[in-house]
Image (cartoon, coloured by chain):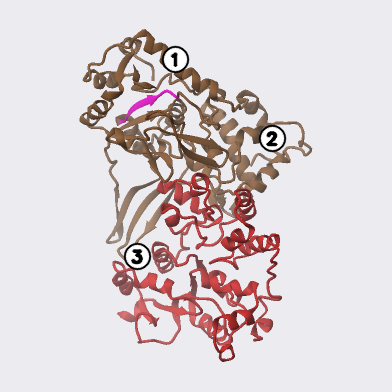
Amino acid sequence: MTATPEQLTIAAKSLWLDKKEFQSFLNVLREGGYQIIGPRIEQGAIVYGPVDRVEDFPLGWTDEQAPGLYRLKKRDDDALFGYAVGPHSWKRFLFPPQLDMMRSKKVGAGWDMEPVPVETVKYAFLGVRACELSAIEVQDRVFLNSTFPDEYYQQRRRDSLIIAVNCTMAAATCFCTSMDSGPRCRTGYDLALTELIDGYVVEVGSVQGATLIERLALPTVAAVQEERAEVARRQAVEQIQRVLDREHVQSTLKQRLNHVHWDDVAARCLSCANCTMVCPTCFCSSVEDVTMLVDQEVVRQRRWDSCFNFDFSHVSGGPVRDQTRSRYRQWLTHKLTTWVDQFGTSGCVGCGRCITWCPVGIDLTKESVILCSEAGLDKPQDSPL
Amino acid sequence: MTECRPKLAVMKFASCDGCQLTLLDMEDELLTIARAVQISHFAEASSSLAPGPYDLTLVEGSITTREDRQRLTQLREDSKYLVTIGACATSGGVQALRNFGSHDEFMRGVYARPDYIETLATSTPIAAHVKVDFELRGCPVDKHQLLEVIASLLAGHRPKTSTESVCQACKRRGNVCVVVAQDMPCLGPVTQAGCGAICPAYDRGCYGCFGPTRQPNPKSLSDHLLRQRLGEVECAMLLHGINAYAPEFATEGQRLWELAGVPKPLHASLHSDEEGAQE
């Protein structure tokens, strides 16, 4: 969305939110009618869920990540946002994992169909990272910018408030700098915070954000705080080690459909679909009518689906992609190359979730280097299935 | 009136009755089921047992005796649709561990007077003996899937039970992966969904109750678990559990036993009735 002149004026002045005032900030959001969704610790990880009080946050915790590995670690300060990204993404709120869409009941000789009304809920997403803003933008293209916009997504997206947080550290699995999607939040937020030890530099990105933050009557940020915030944000950039050669992969991967390395990945890939479930841009779902026993009632349910499922490409006669090799190839080539043809942007935002949450640690940044290499390209190209 | 309703039979072979109990546990739906079908034979629920033919027969348990095998052949003839319910009927169950060991040794270990026991040397799934129309997985089966099977067959279409992995249900539920975050051995990535990912929701790895997914890759998973310093024996026992005799789990488990230096060959001609009939 383009910023109005008014927004640009607002955005010009950053504000200072003292750490002691953070609860008041949460209260303002609640009073604004928002259900706050933010980071909290569950099952040994930082996930997204309802947060109301400062104590709900992962105070003083960080995450350590590697391919197939995630660990919570204590920090030596009380940061609330001192971690990278966890297994959840905001898509579980904008595009819920399971949704009842329609109920139908047999009445006489016909069917009475009743759509399930779109539940109105105003979320304030607190702690959205730059890569996640990009991911939301990617899903907007899928769900909103189409002939048939998804009304469930539309409603949630329209009514939700986005409070971004600039990263001041990176995980070993992060590569947003390669995907041009972070770590600095540039657009797509209502408010953006940069966390310092004693408070937050608040940037205002929209009228809604401005209206809410006004109630706290925050002072304008001092130049010295601005500088400290910049140093903190630079730290995240410096910590990012992982690289994906975006342009090269985009242009080359499609020429490597018969690379022998696909077999090597397939020997490790579990085809379990974890990568697609944690991916903040993956948008596939299936719709199924669930029949009740005798009441002649049917509920139409939509659920997250995945191209890694054997039955996903099932057509008359059987599945089109009937091997793990072809399913992995479909996923990776779509994510990194054909997504660009389809939606004008890459399907990957460099958040690293698919690397961390692959149970066997398959790393697309490593695999794509090998797959794009000339070595192993000994067979002619076959059909791009 | 009542005669128009399809006849349902629930039959048991070698099993713990847990899957039948899933049907009995459907307190909210049981009356509806009873209105939709005529429950002709369900020993767990009623002592009034009507003879066949039946329209839909739900079969629990594996084949472990010669008598059961004969009874099954007759049951198949008496049933329009024969559906197996649960791990025992579908893959031989936990009792199929004897397929990898010495039957005599097991008998001596368990029974004070093994000479009183007459049983086959193997535990085999129903489909190893007769044609099965649909196999419902689980230990025990899931109530919703069981309802789906009954409702679908009554409506005349194929039951919709997903072949996706437990991981997908786990992620939809919002669970944090216990393999990645807690180094816990878990069969979720190679196991078919259906349970709603109960165990990982309570910080436990998946036991593989619902058997292998379509095209599972248990070797990659166990290689990873071994790298995480899980012992070969523990890893083998993970695969050789409730669905030990499901082909993909059987093979990988055997590879791991071999690695551990404790080879567990399968009985020769496991599926041959002639061989199995001995002992």
Q: Is residue A162 magenta?
A: yes
Q: Is residue B11 magenta?
A: no
The mark found on residue A179 in the picture is none
Q: Which residues are magenta?
A: A160-167
Q: Are marks 3 and 1 on the same chain?
A: yes
The one nearer the camera, A29 or B259, is: B259
Secondary element at image label 1? helix
- The answer to whether B154 is drawn above or below residue A287 in the figure is below
- The answer to whether A73 is drawn above or below residue A16 in the figure is below
The residue to which callout 3 is attached is A293
The one nearer the camera, B131 or A274, is: A274
Q: Are marks 2 and 1 on the same chain?
A: yes
The mark found on residue A371 in the picture is 2
Q: Amino acid at mark 2?
A: Leu
Label 3 is found on which chain of the structure?
Answer: A
Secondary element at image label 2? helix
Q: Residue A233: in sight, yes or no? A: yes
Residue lying furthest right: A378
Label 2 is found on which chain of the structure?
Answer: A
Q: What is the distance, in whole Å, between disc 3 and disc 2 at their CAs? A: 50 Å
Q: Residue at x 58, y 73 (%)?
A: B96
Chain that is brown in the image: A
Q: Residue A17, image x and y in percent? A: 30, 19
Classify residue B246 as left or right of residue A291.
Answer: right
